[in-house]
Amino acid sequence: MLRIRLRRDGRRNLAMYSVVVAEQKFRRDGRFIEKIGYYQPILLDTDPYRINLNTEVYDKWVALGAQPSEKVQFLYKKMQIKNSNK
């Protein structure tokens, strides 16, 4: 089963995450099929570089049957709200 989930990057005490499409059996930081965005929790909520998610590619993978994790669903909804306010 395909999952859309976070992959940890960065260094100790300075984490950043890539949003990736991966097979569920792969390790968290292991192989992945496609990178579709990133999330930097260290930055402020108002910073435009905190969340970047390619929503078109996200929708394509969900239509193909990929299951997003809870955190990725939350980030996707946050991106939709941020884009609708512009």
Image: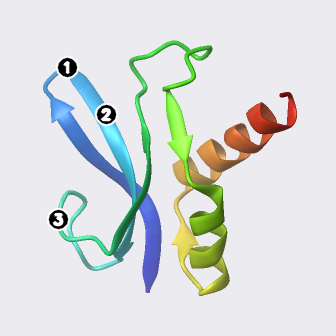
How many numbered marks have been drawn onto this rendered protein structure?
3
Q: According to the image, label 3 marks what residue? A: 30
Query: Which of 47/4 is in front?
Result: 47
**In this image, 11 relative to 21: left or right?**
left
Q: Secondary structure at mark 2?
A: strand
Query: Which of 56/18 is in front?
Result: 56
The quadrant of the picture occupied by the C terminus is top right
Q: According to the image, label 1 marks what residue? A: 13
Task: Work out whether 77 lies above or below 3.
Answer: above
Tell me the residue at 22%/41% (across/down).
9
The amino acid on which the numbered mark 1 sits, given as a three-letter code, is: Asn
Q: Nearer the viewer, mark 1 or mark 2?
A: 2
**In this image, 68 relative to 15: left or right?**
right
The amino acid on which the numbered mark 3 sits, given as a three-letter code, is: Gly
Q: Name the quadrant containing residue 57.
A: bottom right
Mark identifier at residue 59: none
Tell me the residue at 13%/25% (across/down).
12
Q: According to the image, label 2 marks what residue? A: 16
Tell me the residue at 57%/76% (across/down).
61
* Crowd around label 3: few <14 · some 14–19 · many ≥20 (10 Å): few
Picture coordinates of residue 85, whole percent (x, y): 86, 28
Answer whether labels 2 and 3 touch (C-beta < 8 Å): no
**Separation of disc 2 and disc 3 at Cα?**
15 Å
Picture coordinates of residue 10, whole percent (x, y): 19, 33
The mark that comes first in sequence, 1 or 3, is 1
* Crowd around label 2: few <14 · some 14–19 · many ≥20 (10 Å): some
**Separation of disc 1 and disc 2 at Cα?**
10 Å
